[in-house]
């Protein structure tokens, strides 16, 4: 029993070191961005919570960078257009994984109809089009390798 | 299986190649169960995107882009979120007056009482101090019919030329640029040119944030034809430059030298089109004609090396962009406030036109200088209507006797009715209010207490004069100064025409009834005018259609002829581009071009005919480099500039009511280059003071390399941090447009 406790404690310690190390790394890698994520919860977002991207550059850097490099990023189709506002009080429902028929369809309905007519229903959009990816000079269905950029 | 998969993917790629370019939003709100869709135009910028408003049970429930208008069904994120703005809690729904003077509270009253209260000081001023003591301050957001009636009431009814408005602050330099170079206002090209261009020269415009739907169209052009070159010239490395082949970051205010440098390279390397400028252009220095050789000699002062010393742009880059511009099959130039809001805004406009005239990149598909506009109806509603202090309808000038006589005949006025002297332009108007010379002002559809330059100085006029304001939103800063607030119906609650950047007139039809007690502004204006004493025969209109009918037929007496754009046609079609003289005319794509522009005689010997000029030739001006009014110096070592962000529009009275837009950009900030931030020990979020010779304000810092070292930027939308308090009010001597883009500032951290 004691050994189980000890193992658990070691495990907890190890986990704490990993999490701490992660935050140290993130803060070192993104020195100009201050992270408010630790202080706010999405559904209780204060009025002055600014754009999502500044936090997500730290918390989900790959998604943030992918968005930035995508057509949506270039054309400034911001997070809330698909994901809604974190406090759920906006016109668009807050959803980390938006329902594709209404959310993608809001802009891409004509294209989705053409695709469905040609290929039938093949799952949601992301079956073929990787989330947050679609750079301006690539084919939309090709998955990108992990970005090596860290600037945002 | 692999082959099948590859084929599938190829097929997929082909199918989505055009459609998947998402960008602006096709329909961000899904109402569901709409009973009808009513056609209109977006309320925001000058792009003029067509919209369809979904109506259910008498309420607007959804919006989508009009697939038949130029935007082909797309809207930007602001346009896609217009519906919540209508039902915002900030709407003003009852007339209000301040009975006890400026220090009293606004109290709600009946329309009768409010209009009488509004009219009496105007009547008194007219009787005691004459027509020059009253003024109308209008807007590029007002409907065409409203601006037309206000202009007629003032200039013909009250005999006062004090009619100006916020277009003076944004497009006056573009107007004067077109008029001085081509003789007539408004561009010769259209948005179609974007789809045919092989080179874009974008200068002084953050298209991606200020005109997102056009930016999407440019990006799509680049995506489908990767050989297309994009030059973005801007001291800020904005989001627009993300699709650029070359971003030219020049020292703020030196673009006149840059463009003369490009002209120098074009001529030195014989990239000019001598046949074109030989046949269709005159060279002019000041007011005097000169010849090509003298122009060449003038450009000797602008060798790439000399220009490098002025602009900080490497000489090789100047040569490179000049070649790109000239050697393309067709170049489209796009510019906006970075060029217009300058003490030499008109000259800067002339220099852009010079490049097109020199190279012959004009009056062909995909080759045009196209000035972008910031408001939805500055072109159609104010420039064409002539609702500015120096203008009369259809490009006529107040100080031209023949033009005044023409208008007096067309409006059935006794000769000599229209005052021969131009009225007060915006700065002079607000100065006149401060001095007590202008005693009463009618402000329509704009928020000058937020948008004027040198606010601390110019808002004194609003504290002094009697102010009547039509407004939809309680958050407008100007309400603080208004003696009377008249609630106007908002956007799709009434009907009227907007004219956008590309000479396209589109009708917004009434989708829902005006909320509360608000009334269409046209009715308000006419009721007010009659109370002040305008002859009712001068404004005999029952509705906006009657006004349009008169305006349409009036245009037939000018080269701005759109007599063929009837109200019925506007209801049927999603916008028509003028000139359009007859009902069966499809509208004009290329202005000044024989067989395309109906104003060019079909038997004209030349393909291109700049009929705005007496000899049919456009002008290439010798315009020297002139520095900005207040460059950075030892005491104020930074340059401050200002502009828009994608999420907000103008003073955020509309976009601020939408939770998503408000939270995406809750407040203004100051962009500082990392080099400068390091020197000043500023990190992201630090409170930073901007102190100019006028005032100082504290902004949170945003450290980014968008701004070049030595330059700081703040957006102007935030009513809590009105950056215009920091700016001077020096204006272009020709256009009287103030220089909002450059002033000197100190930057320091709050200790």
Image (cartoon, rainbow, N blue to C red):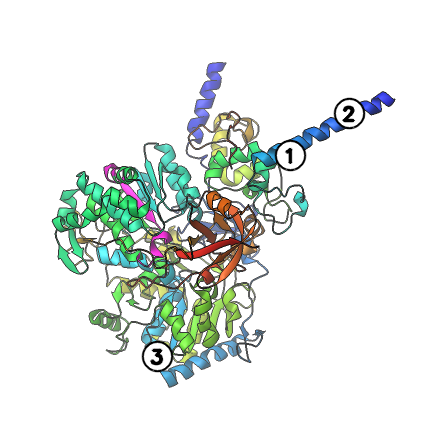
Residue placed at 45% from the left, 67% from the top?
A: B521
Residue B80 visible = yes
Task: Check disc 2 and report the residue beneath it.
Answer: A10
Viewer-nearest residue: B620 or B473: B620
Marks 1 and 2 in Cβ contact (< 8 Å): no
The C terminus of chain B sits in image quarter? bottom right
Q: Residue A41 lies in what quarter of the image?
A: top right
Residues in magenta, as a range: B323-344
Element at badge 1?
Answer: helix
Residue placed at 42% from the left, 38% from the top?
A: B242
Q: In the orientation shown, which residue stands out farthest toward the right?
A: A1
Task: Check disc 1 and report the residue beneath it.
Answer: A23
Element at badge 2?
Answer: helix
Q: Chain of mark 2?
A: A
- Whole-number angstrom distance, CA of label 1 to CA of label 2: 20 Å
Which is more foreground, mark 1 or mark 3?
1
Q: Residue B319 lies in what quarter of the image?
A: top left
Residue B601: horizontal and vertical position, in percent? 16, 53
Question: Do callouts 1 and 2 point to residues on the same chain?
Answer: yes
Question: Do callouts 1 and 3 point to residues on the same chain?
Answer: no
Marks 1 and 3 in Cβ contact (< 8 Å): no
Residue B595: horizontal and vertical position, in percent? 20, 47
Q: Chain of mark 1?
A: A
Task: Check disc 3 and report the residue beneath it.
Answer: B131
Q: Residue B72 lies in what quarter of the image?
A: top left
- Whole-number angstrom distance, CA of label 1 to CA of label 3: 70 Å
Q: Chain of mark 3?
A: B
- Whole-number angstrom distance, CA of label 3 to CA of label 2: 88 Å
**Height in image: B441 above or below B271?**
below
Q: In the orientation shown, which residue stands out farthest toward the top?
A: B1
């Amino acid at each position: 029993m004691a050994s189980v406790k000890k193992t658990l404690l070691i495990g907890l310690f190890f986990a704490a070191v990993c999490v701490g190390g992660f935050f140290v790394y993130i803060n070192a890698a993104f020195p100009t961005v201050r992270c408010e994520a630790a202080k706010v919860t999405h559904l209780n977002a204060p009025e002055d919570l600014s754009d999502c991207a500044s936090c997500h550059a730290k918390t989900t850097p790959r998604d943030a960078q992918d968005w930035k490099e995508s057509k949506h990023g270039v054309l400034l189709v911001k997070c809330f257009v698909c994901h809604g506002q974190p406090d759920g009080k906006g016109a668009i429902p807050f959803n980390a994984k938006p329902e594709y028929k209404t959310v993608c369809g809001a802009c891409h309905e004509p294209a989705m109809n053409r695709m469905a007519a040609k290929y039938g229903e093949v799952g949601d959009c992301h079956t073929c089009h990787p989330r947050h990816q679609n750079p301006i000079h690539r084919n939309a269905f090709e998955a990108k390798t992990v970005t090596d950029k860290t600037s945002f | 299986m692999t082959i099948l998969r590859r084929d599938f993917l190829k097929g997929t790629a082909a199918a989505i190649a055009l459609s998947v370019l998402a960008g602006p939003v096709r329909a961000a709100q899904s109402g569901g169960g709409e009973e009808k869709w009513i056609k209109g135009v977006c309320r925001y910028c000058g792009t003029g995107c067509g919209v369809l408003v979904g109506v259910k049970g008498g309420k607007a429930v959804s919006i989508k882009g009009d697939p038949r208008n130029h935007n082909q069904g797309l809207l930007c994120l602001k346009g896609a979120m217009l519906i919540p703005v209508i039902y915002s809690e900030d709407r003003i729904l009852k007339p209000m007056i301040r009975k006890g003077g400026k220090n009293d509270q606004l109290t709600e009253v009946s329309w009768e009482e409010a209009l009488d209260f509004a009219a009496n000081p105007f009547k008194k001023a007219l009787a005691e101090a004459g027509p020059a003591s009253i003024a109308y301050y209008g807007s590029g957001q007002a409907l065409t019919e409203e601006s037309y009636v206000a202009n007629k009431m003032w200039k013909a009814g009250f005999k006062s030329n004090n009619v100006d408005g916020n277009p003076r602050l944004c497009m006056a330099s573009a107007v004067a640029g077109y008029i001085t170079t081509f003789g007539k206002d408004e561009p010769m090209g259209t948005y179609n040119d974007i789809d045919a261009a092989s080179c874009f020269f974008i200068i002084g415009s953050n298209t991606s944030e200020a005109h997102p739907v056009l930016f999407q169209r440019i990006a799509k052009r680049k995506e489908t034809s990767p050989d297309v070159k994009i030059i973005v010239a801007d001291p800020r490395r904005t989001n627009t430059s993300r699709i650029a082949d070359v971003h030219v970051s020049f020292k703020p205010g030196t673009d006149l030298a840059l463009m003369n440098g490009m002209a120098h390279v074009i001529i030195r390397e014989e990239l000019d089109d001598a046949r074109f400028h030989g046949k269709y252009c005159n060279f002019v220095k000041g007011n005097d004609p000169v010849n090509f050789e003298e122009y060449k000699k003038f450009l000797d002062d602008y060798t790439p090396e000399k220009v490098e010393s002025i602009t900080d742009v490497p000489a090789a880059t100047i040569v490179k962009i000049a070649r790109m511009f000239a050697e393309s099959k067709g170049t489209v130039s796009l510019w906006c406030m970075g060029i217009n809001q300058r003490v030499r805004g008109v000259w800067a406009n002339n220099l852009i036109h010079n490049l097109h005239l020199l190279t012959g990149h004009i009056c062909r598909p995909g080759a045009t200088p196209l000035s972008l506009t910031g408001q939805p109806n500055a072109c159609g509603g104010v420039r064409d209507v002539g609702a500015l202090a120096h203008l009369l309808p259809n490009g006529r000038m107040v100080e031209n006797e023949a033009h005044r006589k023409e208008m007096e005949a067309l409006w059935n006025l006794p000769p000599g009715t229209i005052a021969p002297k131009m009225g007060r332009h915006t700065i002079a108007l607000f100065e006149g209010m401060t001095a007590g010379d202008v005693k009463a002002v009618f402000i329509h559809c704009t928020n000058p207490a937020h948008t004027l330059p040198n606010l601390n100085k110019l808002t004194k006029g609003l504290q002094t004069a009697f102010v009547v304001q039509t407004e939809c939103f309680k958050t407008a800063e100007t309400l603080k100064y208004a003696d009377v607030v008249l609630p106007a119906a908002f956007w799709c609650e009434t009907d009227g025409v907007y004219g956008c950047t590309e000479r396209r007139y589109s009708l917004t039809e009434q989708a829902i009834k005006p909320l509360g007690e608000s009334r269409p502004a046209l009715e308000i204006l006419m009721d007010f005018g009659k109370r002040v004493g305008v002859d009712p025969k001068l404004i005999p209109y029952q509705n906006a259609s009657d006004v349009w009918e008169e305006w349409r037929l009036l245009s037939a007496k000018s080269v701005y002829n759109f007599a063929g754009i009837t109200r019925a046609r506007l209801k049927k079609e999603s916008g028509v581009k003028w000139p359009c003289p007859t009902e069966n005319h499809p509208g004009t794509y290329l202005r000044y071009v024989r067989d395309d522009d109906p104003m060019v005689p079909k038997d004209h010997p030349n393909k291109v005919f700049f009929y705005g000029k007496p000899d049919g030739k456009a002008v290439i001006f010798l315009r020297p480099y002139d520095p900005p009014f207040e460059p950075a110096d030892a005491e104020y070592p930074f340059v401050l500039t200002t502009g828009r962000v994608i999420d907000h529009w103008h003073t955020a009275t509309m976009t601020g009511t939408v939770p998503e837009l408000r939270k995406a950009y809750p407040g203004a900030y100051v962009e500082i280059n990392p080099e400068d931030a390091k020197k000043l020990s500023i990190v992201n979020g630090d409170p930073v003071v901007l102190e100019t010779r006028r005032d100082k304000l504290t902004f949170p810092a945003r450290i980014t390399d968008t701004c070049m070292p030595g330059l700081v930027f703040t957006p102007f939308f935030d009513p809590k941090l009105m950056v215009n308090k920091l700016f001077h009010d020096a204006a272009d001597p020709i256009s009287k447009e103030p220089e909002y883009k450059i002033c000197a500032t100190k930057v320091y951290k709050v200790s």
